[in-house]
Image (tube, rainbow, N blue to C red):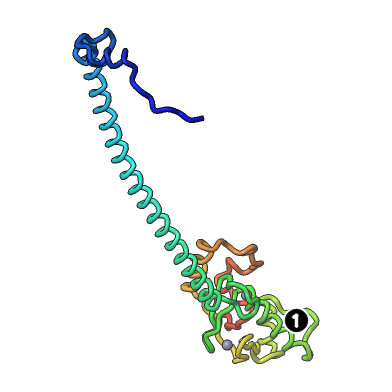
Amino acid sequence: MRVSPKRSSPRSSLRRASPRSSPGSSAAEASSPVGDVFVQQVTRITALLEDDMKQSRLETIKMKAAVRRAQKAQAEAEAAKAHLRESLEQFNAVKSEITKCGVCMDTMNRPFVLVECGHSYCYGCLRLHFHTCLRNQVKWRDVPEHLREPSTADQLHELIENEHIYSPLYYCPSCKGTVRCRPIEVYIFKELIEAVHSVAGPPDDLTVEDPHINDSDIWADMFYTKRA
Ligand SMILES: [Zn+2]
Ligand SMILES: [Zn+2]
């Protein structure tokens, strides 16, 4: 449908041309006290809104900066965690080599060093090994029945003093070198192992049967010393 251009009617032209404004027109409102108050209020509200927007922009900038700082801190924490994990893995690899017992292949429990060769083992593992050595030594000898399984200092003394054996023949489980002296407790390993256990957690079973724990000479049943 064709729409013809809108033309002003003669009546509306007359109304615009008339110097007398009709009540309620915008010009009348702007000049009236009510209109002034309205304009003032709008101006005030606009100013308040602008302030609010400015404040919001500032808050947004601050929040973005805070988010960036938090992201950076998180990335740094992640990097530190990864570094710590790597260090712990390296530490575990080193400690497992240093603190590994050559008999039970586990972390040494109460480590003792053989002075002749420097190899270290758990106290319990060494005791078991030395007992086996001594039993094998008397196995084919003509010894009284009660000395076939020597496990006390008295039995060891009887074996030597009655000349069933000259001295016990012990050897290192690793290098097979002869062991003549009492093994010595390695306190530095003990401390290292305790430190490892405090970081990585203790092993499942730390208890070792040790009937000689309170003896003044814990090797008295294995290494001979002439009694006074
Ligand atoms: Zn062991
Ligand atoms: Zn050795």
Q: Is mark 1 on a helix, strand or loop?
A: helix
- Left or right of residue 194: residue 171: right
Would you name the residue on which mark 1 appears? 147
Q: Give residue 37's position: percent from left, percent from top.
A: 22, 14
Toward which corner of the image does residue 140 lie, by quadrant?
Answer: bottom right
Q: Vertically, is 195 above or below 152?
A: above
- Callout 1, which amino acid? Leu
State the residue in front, 88 or 185. 88
Taking the spot 63% from the left edge, 88% from the top edge, the residue there is 171
Taking the spot 27% from the left edge, 32% from the top edge, the residue there is 50
Ligand 1 lies in which image quarter? bottom right
- Left or right of residue 90: residue 158: right
Taking the spot 77% from the left edge, 82% from the top edge, the residue there is 148
Q: How crowded is mark 1: few (under 14 residues within 10 Å), some or many (20 or more)?
A: some
Rendered-image quadrant of the C terminus: bottom right
Considering every residue shown, the one lying at the far right of the view is 145
Toward which corner of the image does residue 45 lie, by quadrant?
Answer: top left
Q: Give residue 9's position: percent from left, percent from top.
A: 34, 17
State the residue in front, 9 or 74. 9
Q: Give residue 83's position: percent from left, percent from top.
A: 44, 66
Taking the spot 49% from the left edge, 65% from the top edge, the residue there is 85
State the residue in front, 206 or 80. 80
Q: Give residue 77's position: percent from left, percent from top.
A: 42, 58
Total residue callouts: 1
